[in-house]
Every structure is written in C-alpha cells, then in structure tokens.
C-alpha cells in the first residue's frame, strides 16, 4: 500500500509540472538593499474560498512574512502574510505561502 503522503506529494509534482513556473521572491521589497531569487512554484487559491491566494513550492524556501512574490513575466506583486507546511501521514508534501496583492509601492492593491 502506498503511503498517502507520498501519493499526495507525487500528485503535487504532477500539478507543478503542468501549472507551475518560475516565481521571483523579493526580499526587502522597494528598499535600497533589496535582493531577489527565483524558484519553481505554483500560484493557486483555496478550493473552499477562491479569494484566499497562495503560492505552493515543492520544498521549504527562505521566505519571511512581508516578503514579496511575483510570477516571472508578471507585473503583479503579492505580499506574504502567512506560511504553512502541508504534511500528510508524516510526509512533507509542499510549502505554502499565503499572500495579498500589492502595488509597486507595497500598498494593498
């Protein structure tokens, strides 16, 4: 019998392959000493409430509350307000960052 967590993780990787893309993580957004890096991730929303936007990643990444995300090629910015790990039957499935849309000045959009 396959472990449920491993099954969920395998399913996540299939979705990531189909719907994922590069996500830019901005540290210290709009500051003189800002930095950024890219990693593969996927923008999504909660099934039960499509107004709750999140980004999902296959591994835990270096991100803090207040960091800003941007899908590569997009002009939209998203500020992180909560982080969470999805664990099923003791298996790490994916890392979740909950976000709110902001403008280029960092204000709510």
Image (cartoon, rainbow, N blue to C red):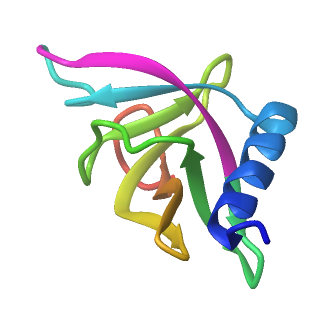
Is the magenta region chiefly helix, strand or loop?
Answer: strand
Residue 22, placed above or below residue 7: above
Residue at 62% in and 20% down: 72
Residue closer to the observer: 23 or 73: 23
Q: Inspect the magenta stretch and tell me whether residue 34 lies in it.
A: yes
| Region of the chain picked out in magenta, as a range | 33-43
Residue 89, placed above or below residue 71: below
In which quadrant will I find the N terminus? bottom right
Residue at 37% in and 61% down: 83
Q: Can you give x and y, in whole percent of width and height, for residue 46 in the image?
A: 69, 73
Residue at 28% in and 36% down: 62
Residue closer to the observer: 67 or 42: 42
Residue 81, placed above or below residue 67: below
Report which quarter residue 40 is drawn in: top right
Q: Inspect the magenta stretch and tell me whether residue 16 lies in it.
A: no
Q: Can you give x and y, in whole percent of width and height, for residue 64 in the image?
A: 24, 47
What number of labels is visible? 0
Residue 108, placed above or below residue 89: above
Residue closer to the observer: 91 or 36: 91
Report which quarter residue 57 is drawn in: top right
**In the visual, does 32 lie left or right of 35?**
left
Q: Can you give x and y, in whole percent of width and height, for residue 88 in the image?
A: 57, 73
The furthest residue to the left? 33
**In the visual, does 85 lie left or right of 7?**
left
The furthest residue to the front? 1
**In the visual, does 99 lie left or right of 62?**
right
Residue closer to the observer: 65 or 75: 65
Q: Can you give x and y, in whole percent of width and height, for residue 53 in the image?
A: 61, 61
Report which quarter residue 21 is drawn in: top right
Residue at 43% in and 63% down: 85
């Amino acid at each position: 019998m396959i472990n449920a967590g491993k099954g969920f993780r395998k399913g996540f990787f299939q979705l990531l392959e189909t719907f994922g893309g590069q996500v830019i993580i901005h540290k210290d957004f709009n500051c003189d000493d800002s930095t950024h890096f890219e990693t593969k991730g996927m923008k999504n929303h909660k099934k039960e409430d499509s107004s709750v936007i999140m980004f999902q990643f296959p591994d835990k990444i270096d991100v803090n509350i207040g960091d800003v995300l941007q899908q590569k090629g997009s002009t939209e910015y998203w500020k992180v307000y909560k982080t969470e790990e999805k664990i099923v039957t003791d298996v790490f499935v994916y890392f979740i960052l909950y976000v709110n849309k902001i403008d280029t000045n960092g204000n709510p959009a």
